[in-house]
Image: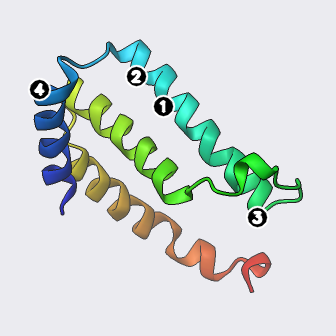
Amino acid sequence: MSIKQSQEQVDIWIKNHGVRYFNELTNMAQLTEEVGEVARIIARRYGEQSEKESDKNKDLGEELADVMFVVLCLANQTGTDLEAAFNKKLDLKTERDHDRHHNNDKLK
């Protein structure tokens, strides 16, 4: 599914199940909360913190999908074509960073 299709699917879901979008500030707070949940899993599963018993069954994919859902909501409600923005950013990063990363001794 493309990013554009994902934005459309989220919009359909909101209209059918969510009544309306939360306002942008509420969604920003929600995004922060969801990113925090991802950070908690990463820190405990892949970082140096020990994983609590209550966190062992947390699904990283599900938490990342929560982040994507809220990002897509924010894109929709602000009129952002996220697919176009992402493609533009990828082009910029490709041009700007190609040699930079190949010449980074820390990555070898």
Q: Is mark 1 on a helix, strand or loop?
A: helix
Label 4 vs 3, first from the N-terminus: 4
Query: How far across and how far down the image is residue 10, in percent?
Result: 20, 39
Q: Mark 4 points at which residue?
A: 15
Label 4: which secondary element: helix
* Residue type highlighted by circle 4: Lys
- Which of the two residues, 49 or 107, is positioned nearer the viewer here? 49
What residue did someone put label 2 on? 27
User: Percent position (x, y) of residue 71?
Assistant: 36, 38
Spatial CA span between label 2 and label 1? 6 Å
* Mark 3 → mark 2, Cα distance in angstroms: 28 Å
Q: Name the residue under label 1.
A: 31
- Give amino acid for label 1: Leu
Asked if the residue at tag 3 contacts the one at tag 1, i.e. Cβ–Cβ closer than 8 Å, the answer is no
Give the mark toward the camera: 4 or 2. Answer: 4
Q: Nearer the viewer, residue 13 or 104?
A: 13
Gap between marks 4 and 3, in whole Å? 38 Å
Instruction: Give the class, few, some or many, for how many residues have Cα within 10 Å of label 4's Cα (few <14, many ≥20).
Output: few
Residue 46, which numbered label?
3
Q: Which amino acid does label 2 sit on?
A: Asn
